Amino acid sequence: MAQRLNMKKGRSLRTDFILALCLTTVIALAITLFFNYFFVYSKNMAALQKSSETKVAKAVETLKQPLWLYDVSFVNIYAEILATDSSLVHVSIYDERDRPLATITNQARAEPDRDITWRLERTIQLKNRQVGRLVMEFTNADIRTLTRKMMLSNTIIMLIILLSVLAITWMLMTRQILSPLKIMEKNFHRISAGDYSRRAPLEKNNELTRISEEFNTMVRQVQLREEKIRESEVKYRNLVESSSDIIFKTDIGGDLVFINSNFSQWTGFDPKEFIGKPFSILFSKESPSMDPTAFMQNPVPGNPTLWELALVKNQGGTIPIELSISVQLDLNNHPLGTTGIARDITERKTLESKLQQSQKMEAIGTFAGGIAHDFNNIIGGILGYAEMIEMFDARENDKLKSKIDHVLKGTHRARDLIEQILTFSRHSDQKKRPLNLGPLIKDGLKFLRASIPSTIKIKEGISGHPCAVWANETAIHQILMNLCSNAADAMKASGGTLTVALAEERPAKASMVADKDPGHGVTLTVSDTGEGIDAGIRERIFDPFFTTKGTGDGTGMGLSVVHGIVKELNGTITVNSDPGKGSSFKVTLPGLDHGIADEKESAPPAMVTTGKGKILFIDDEEELVSFSRELLEQTGYQVVGTTSSVHARHLFLKDPMAFDLVVTDQTMPNITGFDLAMEFLETCPDIPIVLCTGFSMPDLEKQALAAGIRAFAKKPLGARRLIDLVEQMM
């Protein structure tokens, strides 16, 4: 409306046309007169200059004879005749000695400020002898006067012509253009008011008629586009309202201007209550603060900003969402506001939590594998020296032999634990066999009774049926010890009852299909009457290093290790706990129906034989090198031990024939045991080599045996195993 008012106050097209036509006429007249004056003046000046040259030449010819005869009277008369020329301002005639004979100046003819004058001087000669000199000065005063008169008449004629053209043009303009435009203006005004039924018809078939027709076509197109826009708005609203996400729009200040109905379904709030308020109030106070003006300063179209926030619910609680905010720009790329899309990511958060748990278990497995490798070397030295004492020093000393047996049992147990850690870290495979869990659980509880306070009562519920599983003793013992230790710790303040139950679970007969047993499980349940576990930390109890105990009371590793062992045995572990009502951990392992293998008697100490030969022993653990050298030298071998693979290569390559056997560790600084063995075999293909490792690596073992390495030994070796291995190789 403001635009229409401004248009009415401005000049009309008729007035603009008159002013433009007058201005054009004046400019055209001025330009025409200027060029006309220039060309006429230039032409007349050229003619005058040529005429003056002719006059001077004629005067020179006339004055030759009188100057030769020195006829002064004739010279004066002729000078007066020359002075009668209206274009001549000054004339001077000199004799041969340059003495003036006649001088005439016409001061009335010269206008120094306006006229242009020029001087022509000629020497007068007769018979090759100078008889005088002629000086004539001319002016353009007559030419300028003549040119002005002619320009005045031309101007009058041109004004008459231009005014005639102007009048005719105005009449034609009014009839052919201005009147049709007035008709079109009235119709366009009605169309712009929304009356698309109006048209702008013109009778004559000219450019304005075609413009009118194009405008009518444009009106029809606008009408169709408005209908499509209305349909698009309906589709857009239906799409926004039917979306599973929350969609909202804000103005440039971050205040809500629209929010779809999903907001009410998700949160229970009425969307109308939030219109006109900052959109940040939709989210919990713990969510990161968002300033919409910050990302509107440098908006990037099509580049939304993602946020992970918590949406507040009416009845309390929050919903985890992923919020995508994009800046909306106008046609000039100026920000108008933002559009936000909030998506429920509860399921994704659950999956992320499970993935993080898996990654944590994998990380702790890698960490445990590194610890187990170093611990393996320590146990290797203890086991070796203990077996040496048993083999050489305790044969006639029953008291010492009994003590060494306890040491060996402890080291064997530690070796089994290392094997379990390596299994947990996926660096080794458990040596599993069919186990009856009943006796194993009872023995474990007897051992546990001594370490649990007397205020805690242990209650057994072990089934009389053979509860057989495919596992190993160390894994089951570790599961039992960790679960019972945690249960006892939960009851240490006020006492309570620790219940350990073992039962066999078989599916109902009705669930069997085609007379096939779908399998059964063996369930170990450890329950306590302690404090219970809060719901907020229940999902984290299997995380590595997570603990609710004080500093120095726990490492947070127990349940994570149990979780890894159960998973390795293809079982499941669940927890049921409420604050103040105790906790119950249920471990279910796949059951077996076939018989249980008999326990093997421990092998009697091997008889020590005497051997001979020179052995190169390589290991990065100094204690293992020392133990192996002492053991093998005590059985008759010469041993060269080193903790450096570089030094070992130097010793061997210096004299390859000096050694009868090479025993090397795989994990060595600088050069691995396998690479070192390859260099030795290139120099001496027949040298027997034993490659030792604390990990179970089937691919490396196959590669080593295929490359010519004689044996692949698992650490810790111990004295008996090392002696047997050396005897086989030698």
Image (spheres, helix red, strand yellow):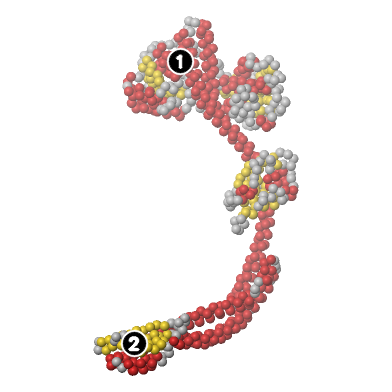
Question: Helix, strand, or loop for circle 1?
Answer: helix
Q: Quadrant of residue 541?
A: top right
410, 534: nearer the viewer: 534
* Left or right of 686, for residue 512: right
Q: Residue at x 41, y 16 (%)?
A: 629
The residue to which callout 1 is attached is 719
In this picture, is 244 found above or below 565? below
Identify residue type, mark 1.
Ala
Tag 2 secondary structure: strand
C-alpha distance separating marks 1 and 2: 152 Å
Residue, x 72% and y 41% (percent of image)?
313
Q: Nearer the viewer, residue 637 or 183?
A: 183
Residue 540 appears at what percent x and percent y?
63, 31
Name the residue rendered at 43%, 82% in the picture.
116
* Residue 356 seen from this side: yes
Does the residue at mark 1 contact the one at mark 2 (Cβ under 8 Å)?
no
Which amino acid lies under the numbered mark 2 shown in the image of this protein? Pro
The quarter of the picture where residue 61 lies is bottom left
Give the x, y percent position of residue 231: 67, 59
Q: Is residue 635 above or below residue 665?
A: above
Which quarter of the image is occupied by the C terminus?
Answer: top left
Q: Which residue is mark 2?
A: 100
How would you rate the neighbour count of disc 2 (Cα within 10 Å): few for under 14, some for 14-19, many for 20 or more? some
Quadrant containing the N terminus is bottom right
Q: Is residue 615 above or below residue 149?
A: above
